[in-house]
Image (spheres, rainbow, N blue to C red):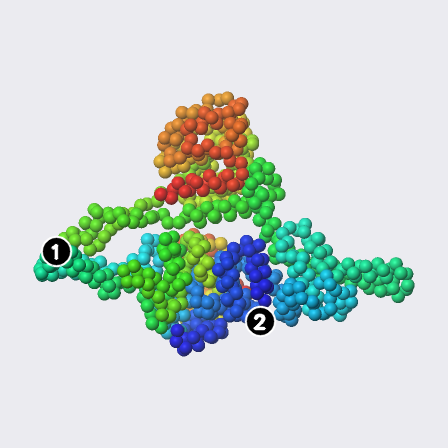
Amino acid sequence: MLPEQENKLKSVKDITDNLGSVGYISTDQISTAVYIAHHLRKPILIEGPAGVGKTDLAASTAKFLNLPLIRLQCYEGLDEGKALYEWKYGKQLLYTQVLKEKLHDILDEVDTMDQSMEKLHDFDDLFFSEGFLEPRPLLTALRQENGAVLLIDEIDKSDEEFEAFLLEILSDYQVTIPEIGTISSPVPPIVMLTSNNVREIGDALKRRCLHLYISFPEADRERAIVEARVPGISDDLLKQLVSFVQQLREQDLKKLPSISETVDWAKVLLLMHADRIDPEFVRSTLNVLLKFETDIEAVDNKIIEMTRKANDPSPLRR
Amino acid sequence: MERTLTNFIKALRAADIPVSIGESIDALKTVSVTGYDDRTFMKDALSCVVAKTPEEKAIYNDLFDLYFSRDTSKTAMSNFGDEASEDSEGGEPSEGEPSEGGNTVDQLREMIEGSDASALARAMEVAAEQVGTENIRFSTQRGIMARRMLDQMGMRELEARMIEMRSSGGGGDKEEAEALSQIRDELIQKAREYVEQQYAIYGEAATERFMEDYIQRARLTEIGPHDMDRLQTIIRKIAKRLAAKHSRRRKRRNRGQLNIRKTMRENASTEGIPFKTVWKQKKRERAKVVVICDVSGSVAAYARFLLMLIYGLNEVIPDIKSFAFSHKLVDISSKLEDNEVKEAVKEVIKEVGQGSTDYGAALGALQTEHWNCIDRRTTVMILGDGRSNYGNPRIDVLREVQAQAKKVIWLCPEHPSMWGTGDSEIPRYKPFTDLMQQCRTVKDLERVVDMILASYTG
């Protein structure tokens, strides 16, 4: 890693400031995790409800470090071929077809079986060389000269085998390709894995990672986030809408509104030139915050109460 | 300093946070990066390394505060590391302490009266180290641990001096004895507090684990009402563990097997030259369970646990049907889905649990009224002692059930030696079950359910 980047990771405070400069409002816990990950050269496993900025943390880290962000989205059935590298099967096949036509010329002068085999062996190696190698995200990340931020998104959606396969890469930052050899990374990437807890992550993987749990933000932090994302929003409106969302999160809902939904809602409010939130208005835009019909019905009769509380000019409730 | 950390990790392990050796090495590295001075920084950093679920983080936070709060005076803390290592090497203590490694009466007095908190804390740490208070596991050990600590600190001499003063009779001596007695009380108080804290750090979770272990092995009928809450937690834990184990992927690639038909269709545009390959996939069946519970008298207690466990698993068993019977069969699925299982079962037992048991009638009703809930994916679990009051057991129905279902599993709370005695029809039912299993403890339950779930991992 270049000295310039080292410098940006010098202390927890620097990390918080730098993340702030690219629009990510961090907490001490989050910055500490990044700091420790950098110093111990360990991947971070980030867990938490959907939409609290897990993926964004990786993107923002890459941004302030001026490193490429390499993202691997996990899904059921993801395998090494899609994650690490693949042989360009089509190209190999094409070249084989070409070779087939030339075969006569090549084997023209040889008389014995042994000799022709030897000649053909030369081509064998050709087909499994770098030229036919299709690097996928993991290999790309390992081969970055100046390091990179590798984001393995939603690891819980992948299969168990894939998790096991990641272990070598995450502990040694190297991979072995049988036909070529071991490729190790000149500068280990900063690795972040995210999980929504669709299934429990295996212990072996957890042991190799640092663990960071990001929960819904406190009112103060949420205000800062909305302010950073939706510049131009008035202080009063900001206070009210955050207070309202915070109250919503205390309700018994199927899916609680996340930060990204708060931000969306703020944008909607700004777009509609609202200067304060009132029940009628909330009711008509509630579908931005809540994504289940049952949830919307559940809070319907509490809206008046909640907006009243949110509009309450007395010092903040939370 | 390292010992402080290793002891902390020991405390974490005692509180059920599994810190591996690799993680403790990471913890040491982390602390070497953060240092001990900034406690919040250290707390946040260590939290990433050792606590890896939200629950563990909560325990960790409490324990961290508890563990590192006792050295509020930082000097005591930073001196302690060197002090302790000196002592344990057996070198001559530098402060002229008596040979047993305790403190002189005057020193003790100095600590209490001079309210030299750090010296007292240090002395207590040293004494605790030698007594081994971190090995405390049960609340009953608190008294003896405190006493041993005090002995280690030189309490005996103080008491001896006190008695001597008291018996000598002089006025000044009496006063002196009084003062010593006060110091003694204060020391006892301090030692008790210390041990109390040590118990909170190392012992409480261990006691809890011991109780849980005991409950899992105890016969379900022997578990009293006061342990019910604990049992419920255990069942929830088991359900979670089983769910985690079996909720892994539903689809599995059957590597190496080419799906020829699909591959050819896919590559029609390249004249059948296989540029794209399609591989065969195996689909995993979704578990489907039908539970039939005898809720008469003695078996009712078991029924409750079985239902609690099965419904705790709805994450991995999406399709559950349950019936209860004593003299007639009742579909209780909807009741259990809507209510808390504990309450629902009570209600069901009240409703169905009267009258004499009739297995034949129950099986008959299953055949005539609910036959369509059994197909070849279904595992049928029957819980009952098979005591049918000499009625017709309807073995023929069970035979048909077995032919229709994936598996028939019979859980019997009675010991095998009782099977077939009196009106027990178990030996006659047995040939038509895939498994006839004694089921008397939580462990038994867990094993059977684990097995059922494993049979769906195709």
* Mark 1 residue crowding within 10 angstroms, few (<14) / some (14–19) / many (20+): few
Q: Is label 2 in a helix, a strand or a loop?
A: loop
Name the residue beneath numbered marker 1. A112
Using the image, name the chain to which the residue with label 2 belongs: B
Residue B126 coordinates in the image, percent (x, y): 67, 63
Task: Say whether residue B324 is visible.
Answer: no
Question: Which quadrant of the rendered structure holds the N terminus of chain B?
Answer: bottom right
**Residue at the spot x=12%, y=56% of the render?**
A112
Res B37 label: 2
Residue B425 coordinates in the image, percent (x, y): 48, 25
Using the image, name the chain to which the residue with label 1 belongs: A
How many numbered marks are there? 2
**Residue at the spot x=57%, y=37% of the render?**
B219
Which is nearer the eye, B152 or A76? B152
Left or right of B435, for residue A176: left
**Residue at the spot x=39%, y=58% of the render?**
A167
Front disc: 1 or 2: 1
Q: Is label 1 in a helix, a strand or a loop?
A: loop
Question: Which quadrant of the rendered structure holds the C terminus of chain B?
Answer: top left
Residue A85 coordinates in the image, percent (x, y): 29, 61
* Mark 2 residue crowding within 10 angstroms, few (<14) / some (14–19) / many (20+): few
Res A102 label: none
Task: Say whether residue A130 is visible.
Answer: yes
**Residue at the spot x=51%, y=67% of the render?**
B30
Which is nearer the eye, A196 or B214? B214
Amino acid type assigned to the residue bearing label 1 in the image: Thr
Distance from disc 1 to disc 2, alpha carbons, whole Å, reads 79 Å
Which is nearer the eye, A151 or A202? A202
Left or right of A79, for residue B264: left
Residue B445 coordinates in the image, percent (x, y): 50, 39
Amino acid type assigned to the residue bearing label 2 in the image: Asp
The reply to whether callout 1 and callout 2 are in contact (CB within 8 Å) is: no
